[in-house]
Amino acid sequence: MVSPFPGMDPYLEGYLWPDVQNKLSNAMAELLGAVIAPKYVARIELYTVADSNPEGDVGIMYPDVELFRRKEIAEEPLVNYQEGTTAISEATITIPDVMPVEVRIPTVEIRDRFNNQLITAIEVLSPVNKREPGLAPYREKRRHLHTSGVHLLEIDLIRRGQRPFAHPFIPRTHYIAMLTRAGEYRTDVWGVNIQDPLPVLPVPLKAPDPDVPLDLGQVLRMVYERSLYQLSIDYTQLPPPPEFTESDLEWMRSVIKR
């Protein structure tokens, strides 16, 4: 079974996302590797981010955990004078320490096979990349790659959070892809809404070799079908937050009924 949506499936943005993100990266490396060989290779590089502020994604990306326990106020004893002692009131809320969550994020790296030089990095963004404390380090990583002469292709299929690349002319679309080429001070942007098919993106190589195409829609379809995500999705429920507009929801309901 394929996803009912022509492009990005918003139901994948919830607790399934870590699995989706890993499989998208692996599928990209698989498809690109066959095209860029033998001069280049596509490899997966993992880096770890300590998410010290996971509360916003509890129940969305992370499994449900107990963040607090609220006492029933009616059951709270206040003062007991029967034995001449004062009873201690129960706390209204007990809040445990929230431990940092280690998030492993994959990057697709295109490398020159002969000298192992990193040519292009492809980042499928995580919610951790789009909010503090992970946003600032990710922006620093973007800067470092650019100053190191590496092409950077960023694919943002998560609606929540803040875009790492801030610019007044960034399209206000649901999803976005951005390409910053090495040695250039401009960024190509592809804006995509829920109703749109995903774009075919250019993946730059070392000059004078031409770009190779990456069909993002093909990648997502491959991952969806191989992973049988339809078995984990209830399309009768609302998709993960943030909320869509009512017109978007009406369109989505019509697509799901087909």
Image: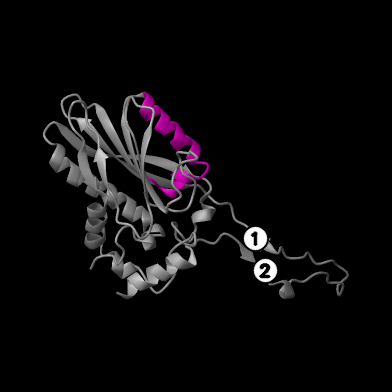
Q: Is residue 191 above or below residue 257?
A: above
> Mark 1 and mark 2 in contact (Cβ < 8 Å)?
yes
Circle 2 residues within 10 Å: few <14, some 14–19, many ≥20: few
Quarter that holds the N terminus: bottom left
Region rendered in magenta:
125-147
Q: Amino acid at mark 1?
A: Thr
The answer to whether residue 144 is magenta is yes
Q: Position of residue 134 (x, y in %)?
A: 48, 41
Q: Observer-nearest residue: 58 or 140?
A: 140
Please, what is the dominant secondary structure of the magenta stretch? Answer: helix
Q: Is residue 43 above or below residue 58?
A: above
Location of residue 181 by image quarter: top left
Q: Position of residue 129 (x, y in %)?
A: 44, 43
- Dot 1 lies on which element? strand
Q: What residue is pinned by disc 2?
A: 71
Task: Give the side of residue 12 with respect to residue 224, left or right.
Answer: right
Q: Position of residue 125 (x, y in %)?
A: 38, 46
Task: Give the side of residue 18 with respect to residue 55, left or right.
Answer: left
The first of marks 2 and 1 along the sequence is 2
Q: Amino acid at mark 2?
A: Lys
Quarter that holds the C terminus: bottom left
Q: What residue is pinned by disc 1?
A: 94
